[in-house]
Amino acid sequence: MRIYLEEVSTAADMAMALRHNFLRLVANEEDRQRITGWLMLQAALMQYGMVSKFVFPVGRASAVAIARADALRDELQIGDDSPLNNRDARNALEHFDERLDQCLERPDAGVVQMIFEDRAGYDYLNKDRWVVRRAYIVDEDVFIMEGPRGAGATEMPLGGIFAELERLAEFAEDRLTGKFQIF
């Protein structure tokens, strides 16, 4: 359990640090559209995916993975309604290559990779004319990317995901310095 808690804590801490850097870049209008912001956000979301897989493994998971996930969810007090159990968000990230393939299958469409201050800017786009590679709406804290084939864009509200990661990082750290402390 200690090894798993250390890894969950480390991944959650990395996600929070990367998110903080992303939000700092987004707050600066001069840096907002630079690739560095996307680097920070996607790296943070990859860490979210790692934690998610530890506590909610894929459907074809081994018996060991299922037992590990059950024990971790119990130890970390994670319910089935946790944002970490958001398969749509995790699948969008894990299948980003397929989403990008879809962008290229529509040579008549433009590709959006942009950070918008609010939804009005995003909604101004003609959805038939554009496919969404990456979009972020600042005032809603929502990441958007192309969804599964024919499903349109997938929206990923980030507030709950990162609040849960922050809670887990603190909770795991408390567990590691208390229950499992080595003298």
Image (cartoon, rainbow, N blue to C red):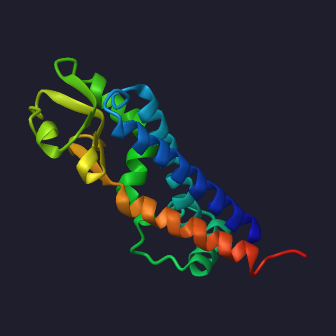
Location of residue 175 (image quadrant): bottom right
Q: Residue at x 16, y 18 (%)?
A: 108
Q: Residue at x 9, y 35 (%)?
A: 124
Residue 178 x %, y %: 74, 79
Residue 104 visible somewhere in the drawing: yes
Residue 47 visible somewhere in the drawing: no
In the foreground, 130 or 38 = 38
Residue 116 vs 155, above or below: the answer is above
In the foreground, 60 or 41 = 41
Relative to residue 121, is residue 137 drawn left or right?
Answer: right
Relative to residue 67, is residue 37 drawn left or right?
Answer: left
Residue 166 vs 143, above or below: the answer is below
Location of residue 103 (image quadrant): top left
Extreme-top residue of the structure: 107
Q: Quadrant of the C terminus?
A: bottom right
Q: Quadrant of the N terminus?
A: bottom right
Residue 118 x %, y %: 18, 44
Relative to residue 121, is residue 67 drawn left or right?
Answer: right
Residue 59 x %, y %: 49, 62
Residue 78 vs 124, above or below: the answer is below
